[in-house]
């Protein structure tokens, strides 16, 4: 049985949640945001977890949530930007679904996140430098997992969703041909 899950990966601010919600609606599938699921299960927001447990404490919680959510069938999930840092998370994603790497320019991310107070990693004097470092560190991991890569900075949301649906459908068709 091919797992029908779709997972969205990429840096913060690339549109994973926005696109994920609309994609899930188009497919009539439930949508999950791994960061929101962590918030809902702990009762506190991500910045608070970072404050009291540090990034490592958050990553432990994130790994448990990714493992739990990847066991579900027929979902769309937006992951946190750093979810791919842990090999166990990458494996859970690769083994259980179709992975879409969403990306856009640092300028576009800064534009989208400038008023967002819920991004602990951007609470720095130089958010641009922080994003550039995160991208350098994470891009090889995003690419190693991705079934498809889409630039959300130049395409309209509807176009992004259309491209995801076409690639997802083609992959499912390919798996069905192999099964048949």
Image: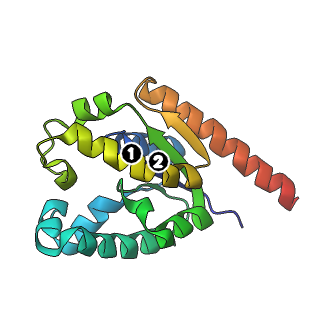
Q: Quadrant of residue 115?
A: top left
**Residue at 64%, 36% in the rendered image:** 166
Q: Which residue position is annotated with label 1? A: 135
- On the image, the x and y values in percent for residue 47 come to 15, 60
* Depth check, front residue: 106 or 6: 106
Where, quadrant-wise, is the C terminus in this rendering? bottom right
Is residue 176 rendered to the left or right of residue 26? right
Q: Which residue position is annotated with label 2? A: 139
Q: CA distance from mark 1 to mark 2?
A: 5 Å
**Residue at 43%, 52% in the rendered image:** 138
Q: Is residue 12 visible?
A: no
- On the image, the x and y values in percent for residue 79 come to 39, 56
Instruction: Tell me: residue 117, above or below residue 41.
Output: above
* Depth check, front residue: 140 or 174: 140
Is residue 149 rendered to the left or right of residue 105? right
Q: Are marks 1 and 2 in contact (CB under 8 Å)?
A: yes
């Amino acid at each position: 049985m091919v797992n029908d899950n779709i997972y969205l990966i990429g840096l913060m601010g690339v549109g994973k949640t926005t696109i994920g919600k609309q994609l899930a609606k188009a497919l009539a599938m439930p949508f999950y945001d791994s960061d929101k699921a962590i918030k809902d299960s702990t009762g506190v927001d991500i910045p608070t977890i970072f404050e009291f447990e540090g990034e490592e404490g958050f990553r432990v919680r994130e790994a448990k949530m990714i493992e739990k959510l990847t066991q579900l069938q027929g979902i769309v999930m937006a992951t946190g930007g750093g979810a791919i840092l842990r090999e166990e998370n990458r494996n859970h994603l690769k083994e259980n679904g179709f992975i879409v790497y969403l990306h856009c320019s640092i300028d576009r991310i800064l534009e989208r996140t400038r008023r967002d107070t819920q991004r602990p990693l951007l609470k720095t004097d130089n958010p641009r430098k922080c994003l550039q470092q995160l991208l350098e560190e994470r891009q090889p991991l995003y690419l190693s997992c991705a079934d498809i890569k889409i630039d959300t900075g130049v395409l309209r949301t509807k176009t992004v969703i259309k491209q995801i649906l076409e690639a997802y459908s083609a992959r499912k068709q390919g798996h069905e041909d192999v099964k048949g």
